[in-house]
């Protein structure tokens, strides 16, 4: 969330306001202690991980799950 030119909150807001990007899953990994206001600003992100609370394997599993969900082919009716 604490990035140099555009912080993560601004990034999430930009994704929400750009129609073509709204379906892109966003995962937040932060060491910042999130306030209630921060959590409200992050509503709509796929997942928020606090550094040190989850293992790297949990984060990787979530990325794999989201990528897999977004790349599944759409099956049309009929044969």
Image: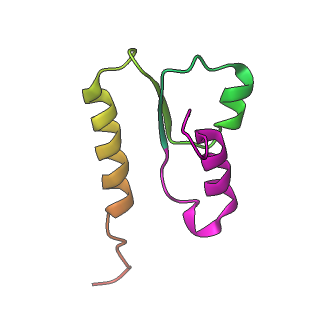
- The residue lying toward the viewer, choosing from 58 and 33, is 33
Residue at 59% over, 46% down: 5
Image quadrant of residue 21?
bottom right
Q: Taking 27 as reference, is 19 left or right?
A: right
> Is 30 within the magenta?
no
> In the image, which residues are magenta?
1-26
Q: Is residue 69 above or below residue 60?
A: below
Q: Could you tell me which quadrant the N terminus lies in?
A: top right
Question: Number of numbered discs present?
Answer: 0
Residue 77, given in percent of the width and then of the height, sits at 38, 79
> Is 11 within the magenta?
yes
Q: Is residue 58 above or below residue 23?
A: above
Q: Taking 20 as reference, is 77 left or right?
A: left
Residue 76, given in percent of the width and then of the height, sits at 37, 79
- The residue lying toward the viewer, choosing from 58 and 7, is 7
- The residue lying toward the viewer, choosing from 78 and 36, is 36
- The residue lying toward the viewer, choosing from 7 and 35, is 7
Residue extending farthest right? 37
């Amino acid at each position: 969330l604490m990035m140099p030119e555009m912080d993560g909150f601004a990034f999430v807001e930009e994704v929400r306001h750009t129609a073509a990007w709204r379906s892109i899953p966003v995962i937040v990994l932060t060491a910042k202690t999130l306030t209630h206001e921060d959590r409200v600003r992050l509503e709509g992100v796929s997942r928020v991980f606090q550094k040190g609370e989850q293992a790297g394997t949990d984060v990787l599993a979530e990325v794999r799950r989201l990528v897999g969900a977004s790349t599944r082919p759409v099956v049309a009716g009929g044969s």
